[in-house]
Image (cartoon, rainbow, N blue to C red):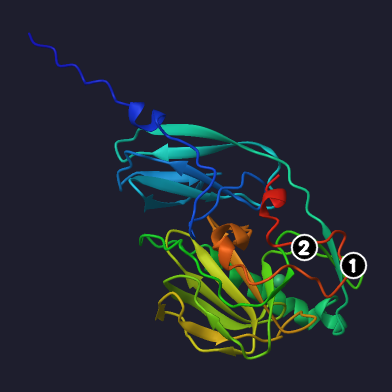
Amino acid sequence: MTQYLKPPIRISIFVSALFFSHFANAMPEQALVPGGIALLALPDYKQDTKVFFNDKRIAVFPYNNTWLAMAGIGLSDKPGDYLFSIRRADGLSLNTKVTVKHKKYDEQHLTIKNKRKVNPNARDNERIAAESKRKRKARKQYSETMPNVDFIWPVSGRISSIFGLRRFFNEQERRPHSGLDIAAAEGTPIKAAANGTVIDTGDFFFSGNMIYLDHGQGIISLYAHLSAISVKPGDIVKQGDIIGKLGQTGRVTGPHLHFAVYANQTLIDPVFMLPEHKAPATVTSPEKTAAPLKISDKSRQNQ
Ligand SMILES: [Zn+2]
């Protein structure tokens, strides 16, 4: 009687997984901090393999001769160990640990003239609740298309606020800053950061006129406070296409673009997605900040 033995499952294919620290060009940059990005190389990746981080499906894309899995690390995630979970179609699952370090985020104090934007009334709160549902739906968008991660700057201008600042509006603490603010003249054209599909557009209480773009596999960009929107849900846009105009709608102190990026439903610092050498200018905040900020000071922020 012949006994057939199942061949041993080869797990060695993932043992060669490497962590990357830096990329040239506009590829996402790894920053193992809250609000940063974790990258995992998967040399023998098969497209029916799914990769998860914090139990959320993450994007996988080709880079040079390998594949990279990209995870957004939440701003409120505590320093410590997190797991990439690689789940193959044949049922084999493999975990790889990554250690997230502490990062100190500075404070920013802003004065808002429209007090309702800081202390909304009952009707405003109803509107805000309805809008949060819509926002949640938008950020949960997950399309199987190959992700477009080679971002360009959506507009040139002065960086008026960076990601992650602990924010005080009229001296009342609110949620930390969830994007990158680029100040320029009202009406300046806003470009799509990468190829994508419009998920949603609308006028939101805090964000003003806003556009969500789906770049594939949970990579989503968001453009807020626009004076005009020139796309509609379902539209397919190419990188650099004009999607709207810079404005000062919603909760603002002046005209600027609030640019935000989601990966695996997690807001990350857009700077790690943008080409560093095309950074428009140095940071000067119109309002007092706890420390001087420089956009070129990326290495300090990564600590
Ligand atoms: Zn902002």
Q: Residue 67 vs residue 290: left or right? A: left
Examine the rendered structure and indicate whether residue 27 appears above or below residue 100.
below
Which residue is at the front of the view, 104 or 172? Answer: 104
Separation of disc 1 and disc 2 at Cα? 10 Å
Which residue is label 2 attached to?
Answer: 175
Choose top left, top right, bottom left or bottom right for residue 257: bottom right
Q: In this view, does 19 lie above or below 130?
A: above
Q: Identify which amino acid the numbered label 1 is placed on.
A: Gln
Q: Quadrant of the C terminus?
A: top right
Label 1: which residue?
172
Q: Residue at (42%, 63%) from the top-left corner? A: 148
Does residue 76 appear in the picture of this structure? no
Instruction: Give the residue type that dot 2 points to.
Output: Arg
Q: Which residue is drawn at 80% across and 81% down?
A: 253
The residue located at (56%, 48%) in the rendering is: 30
Ligand 1 quadrant assignment = bottom right
Label 1 residue SS: strand
